[in-house]
Image (cartoon, helix red, strand yellow):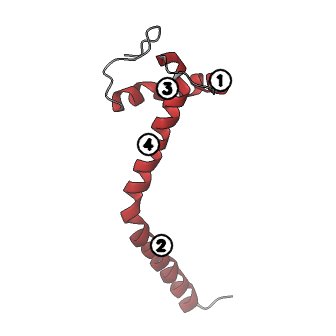
Amino acid sequence: MQEPWRRRFGARLARARALLGEFYTAPYRGAVARARRDEDDLFMLFVYAELMGVPNPATYYTLELQPLLLERFHEWHNRMGLERSPLDHFRCC
C-alpha cells in the first residue's frame, strides 16, 4: 500500500504534467485545426470535382464517398464563398 504523501505527490505530478502539456500545445492548436480544415476542403473538392465539371481521374474511387460527405457539403460550399450549391442537379440550400 502506498503512503498518503506519495499518492498526493503523484496526483500533483500528473496535474503538473497535464498543465505543461496544455502550455506547450495550446499555441499550435489553431494552426493544426486550420491545416486540417484546409485538407478537408481539398478532399471535398476532389470528391465533388466531377459534379462541378472539373475532370477528376479518381472519380471512380470518390463516387462512393459522396453520400458520406453529403451532410458536410453545405458548410463546405459556404466556406468556399459559394452562396448556393454549385451543382445544378443538387440543391442543398
Q: Which mark is residue 15?
A: none
Mark 1 vs mark 2: in front: 1
Q: Reading the chain from its start, which is encountered first: label 4 or label 1?
A: 4
Which residue is pictured at 44% across the width and 43% down the height?
37
Q: Amino acid at mark 1?
A: Glu
Which residue is pictured at 51% across the width and 85% down the height?
8
Q: Secondary structure at mark 1?
A: helix
How far apart in space, not on screen, are marks 1 and 2 (Cα)? 41 Å
Mark 4 lies on residue: 38
Which residue is pictured at 39% across the width and 29% down the height?
75
Mark 1 lies on residue: 64
Q: Reading the chain from its start, which is encountered first: label 3 or label 2?
A: 2
Mark 3 vs mark 1: in front: 1
Circles 3 and 4: CB distance less than 8 Å?
no
Q: Secondary structure at mark 2?
A: helix
Q: Amino acid at mark 3?
A: Glu
Q: Which mark is residue 18?
A: 2
